[in-house]
Amino acid sequence: MFQRILVANRGEIALRVIRACRDLGIEVAVVYSEADRGAPYLKLADKAICIGTGPATDSYLKVQRIIAAAEMANADAIHPGYGFLSENAHFAEVCRACKIEFIGPPEAAMEQVGNKDKAKQLAKKAKVPIVPGSDGILKSTDEALKFAQQVGYPVLIKAVAGGGGRGMRIARNDVSLVSGYSQAQQEAEAAFKDGSVYLEKYLEQPRHIEVQILADKHGNAVHLYERDCSLQRRHQKLVEESPAPNLPEKVRRNICDSAVRLVKAVNYYSAGTVEFLLDKENNFYFIEVNARIQVEHPVTELVTGIDLVREQIRIAAGEKLRFKQDEIVQRGSAIECRINAEDPANDFRPSPGTITKWHPPGGPGVRLDSHVVTGYRVPPNYDSMVAKLLVHQPTRTEALAVMRRALREFTVEGIQTTIPLHQEIFNTAAFVDGRVDTTFIERVLLPSFSKGK
Amino acid sequence: MANDTTAPRPFDVQTVEFLIGLMGKHELTEISLQEGDQKIRLRKGGVPVMVAAPAAPPSYSAPAPAAPPAVAAPAAPAKKYHEIKSEMVGTYYARPKPDKDPFVKVGQILKPDTLICQIEAMKIFNEIKAECAGTVVEICVNDKDPVDFGMVLFRVDPS
């Protein structure tokens, strides 16, 4: 087992890893930038090392300084947290070359799943369904029509050279496909100097379902069931829960088994999440693998009773998984709200500043993961998440009630937070009924939320 | 006023007695006070607890540049020096090799490209230049100390 671990991250996840190290009796050092100097959680580590100025590019992303800090602290392993360098295969390689274990997956697996095309190939190999797409560039409208009739409308016409949502257009029938196809080609030529397009099945109002997996260095891999993360705004998750509501047991089993098959196919180890989209007919399609511990990992910890960060450390130290698949249960219902320092009444404008009052909720079934205390100054250089508020109850109805109560107790002064938005979500019938999708927040909730203000 | 020789001077016996009284009354272990370039620190013994010093009692005039009183701790000069800070994380080396002289000594005059130390990280030694001009007033780290980003290595008098 490791003697000392360096935490190469900040904020709530740094605190989370520090706690896991303490729970295992491992000494812990943590890095910080000048913007995080004086943060209270730093004192909970045995050693804190300054690695640069506020901007992440001059601190939390500086590979050399982080490795130097690990050597200074005599750490035998580095935990990268999430974001920053956590999915940087080069960083993992450098750590291990310096005889410092990287608490995460092997570089080879990171490279495979980090590349969109390689990940698709991997899914095919593992017999995991992917979003149906025309293989290769389309050469004619006839080819396009043939594909669309095969997979069924609606379809998405995408520019090969596009990306990040650019160069996409929906077609709902043959007529709009033919006209859309030539328009898309012209636009792609003008915007990207490459008029090649391809087609993909378009999923209307899909649900986002992801599966937590754990795998060790001895070839064992298990799933810890799914999380529903459909409530998103601009691709940022707001609320996550487990189990996914209204998910047929057979679908759950298939998705979870697919996830395990996929990570085994790439000799993955450590914690990871396999993400899927679910259409209205409950067909699921693989989209990507997150080769790291995720923000919403506590949701799974609550329903399974397994500490994922401790398990990551054990796995990295070479231990075998201590449980078999049939020993892992999903008990009760857990829900998480991400609380951000943003003003939902003003287009989610960031609200950095000093928190003059921080009275988080408590009581049975409430878990709060946060590095914030009264008097804490939220720095402007990083993401705006200040806390993760979780509840765990025997039924979803009770979980909803406890979350409403916890949100009501939560008092924050000095900054704006998204607590009012969450209160609105938990009073929305569609969410209470488990009938939301990834478009719900932006399509339905936000328009009525701002009207009411 | 500064020229009034009958007014008590900032750190005379009366002030010291007043401060000692304050310490006893409020059960303080240490008081530290600074006025201009005069500084005094009184410590009771045991673990010192830092207390933000209240403003000097209002009856005192502006300090004359007098000799420091016998009880006072040595006055730390409040003059503004340029601090050379580390921009690396690693181990500080004062000498180019263990048997050689250190790169710099106190009192040495620096030019921007003067080599002032080495910092080693990941088995690579990086030569650090002064990047400023002036006289070395203080060397703030010891040979082979670990240093992190922003740590003060040297204080330099730029004049």
Image (tube, helix red, strand yellow):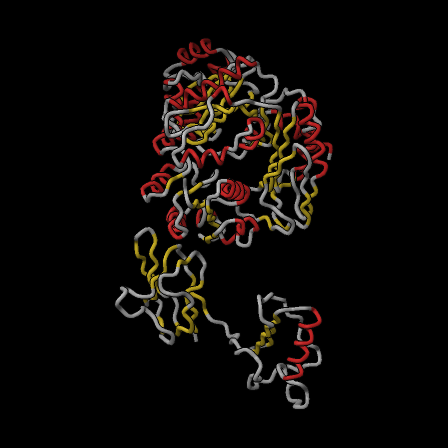
Q: Which residue is rendered at x = 29% and y = 70% of the image?
A: B101
Residue lying at 36% horizontally and 31% vertically, measured from the top left: A111
The picture quadrant where one finds residue B105 is: bottom left
In the picture shown, does residue B5 fall above or below B96?
A: below
Tell me: A251 left or right of A391: left
Q: Is residue A44 visible?
A: yes
Image location of residue A251, percent across then percent down? 53, 14
Nearest the eye: A128 or A254: A254
Q: Relative to A238, is A272 on the left or the right?
A: left
Residue A279's place in the image compared with A318, above or below, is above
- Where residue A316 sits: x, y (%)? 40, 36
Quadrant that contains the N terminus of chain B: bottom right
Q: Position of residue B2 (x, y in %)?
A: 64, 86
Judge by depth and name the residue closer to the eye, A421 or B97: B97
Is residue A183 in sight in this rendering? no
Give the camera-side residue of A65 and A102.
A102
Vertical comparison of A204 with A191: above or below: above
Placement of the C terminus of chain B among the 4 image quadrants: bottom left
Residue B98 position in % (x across, y down): 28, 65
Above or below, comparing residue A389 to residue B79 in the picture = above
Q: Residue at position x 70%, y 77% from top? A: B58
- Residue at 45% in and 28% down: A322
Is residue A279 toward the left or the right of residue A359 in the image? left
